[in-house]
Image: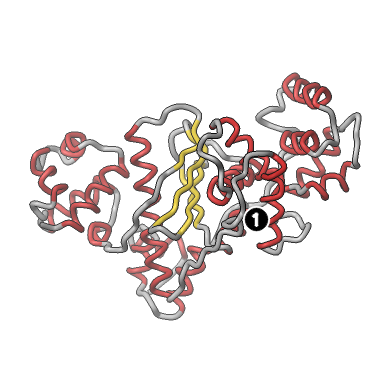
Amino acid sequence: MNVLFSERFRSARLLCGFSLQELADRLDNRISRQALHKYEKGEVLPNSEMIGYLCDVLNVRPDFFFRDMEVKLGTVEFRKLDRLPAKEENRIIERTKDFLSRYLELEEIIGLSSEFTNPLSNIDLVSTQDEAETAAEMVRKAWRLGMDPISNTVELLEDNHIKVIEFEADLGFDGMQTVVNGKIPVIAINVSRVKKDDRKRFTVLHELAHLLMPLADDLPEKHKETLCNHFAGAMLFPADLIKRELGMKRNKLLVQELGVLKQEYGISIQAIVMRALNTGIISSRYCTQFFSYLKEMNWQVNEPFDFNSGEKSKRFEQLLFRALGEDLISLSKAAALYNMKLADFKSKMLLVV
């Protein structure tokens, strides 16, 4: 029984969102659904010709089916708008597992280890906004951020041994988080929904809150989301900073002023207004008026000021080129880890043998 191939074959199928019958149809009925079922059960191993056909239809390299890096996901927590179809949830999970299997294999080749430490591991359960604020302050202190704006949230998390994955998926969810192999925290975000850098930063830190903050199970889900939003806002714009920038009390805020702060701190105008409310700078009445004004101006989705930071981690690519530069892997292996055909990899990376 070939367990490795059967697991990898099932993963490739779920990545594409195919049922066994849909896969048989894509293969132009060169093989029956029943025979594919035997592959997935590990009862039969396909010959090289059939593996070639499977690679073409499933858009993977042959080595995909025999990669033995173990990736076991813990409980997966999705942040979604509506119920996701099971097929889409499976596809997201398999894409996460596939990327992590390549990432962890690359780290293993180089000799790196992911030694994650949760700076909030010893605190009591968080149930109030003040406690979420304190939790954010603790994380900023543990990660030595001082009072400076966070230049790149994705790189910040990667530097602290949290893997961040970006991919395009169904519009029904923003992000998700889990723990891999019992020790490696992972955040995945849906760039189909989270397109603007300021929203990406907030989403990443919201998912970080779910990973780090101990929240009581009996809290309503809406309250948990509010606490995680508060944590994300406090990470981006700490209370001392926003009071320094806006003053202790304000009766009026100008969009132009908030636009400048958005570009400096990488936090949306709407999130700044909520921070001003939560830190006591403005009243709830004025906050409601301000959001009514944003709605009237149709600025709820596209705010009048943009923030662009190239919010993305280059760590995986940097490690890949390091392994190549140190002759730890061949060009062919690098292409496999990058999940590309060799010719395409050479063309994309402007490499030559």
Quadrant of the image for the N terminus? Answer: bottom left
Q: What amino acid type should be assigned to the residue bearing mark 1?
A: Asn
How many labels were placed on the picture? 1
Using the image as rendered, state which of residue 149 and residue 298 is in the foreground. 149
Q: Position of residue 208 (x, y in %)?
A: 57, 49
Task: Write the residue at 50% across / 67% down.
Answer: 115
Residue shown at 80%/44% (left/top)? 261
* Residue nearest the observer in this picture, 274 or 293: 274
Q: Position of residue 57 (x, y in %)?
A: 24, 45
297 w.r.t. 307: above or below: above
Q: Nearer the viewer, residue 341 or 200?
A: 200
Image-based side of 109 in relation to 189, left or right: left
Residue at 62%, 44% in the rendered image: 126
Q: Which residue is mark 1?
A: 152
Q: Is residue 204 left or right of residue 114?
A: right
Q: Residue lying farthest front?
A: 124
Question: The residue tagged with tag 1: helix, strand or loop?
Answer: loop
Which quadrant, please, contains the C terminus?
bottom left
Query: How did the renderer colour the structure?
Result: secondary structure
Side of 67 relative to 77 (left or right) = left
> Is 67 located above or below residue 331 in the figure?
above
Residue 127 screen position, x and y as percent: 63, 39
Q: Nearer the viewer, residue 120 or 292?
A: 120
Q: Residue at x 40, y 46 (%)?
A: 75
266 vs 102, left or right, is right
Q: Is residue 93 above or below residue 181?
A: above
Picture coordinates of residue 186, whole percent (x, y)? 48, 53
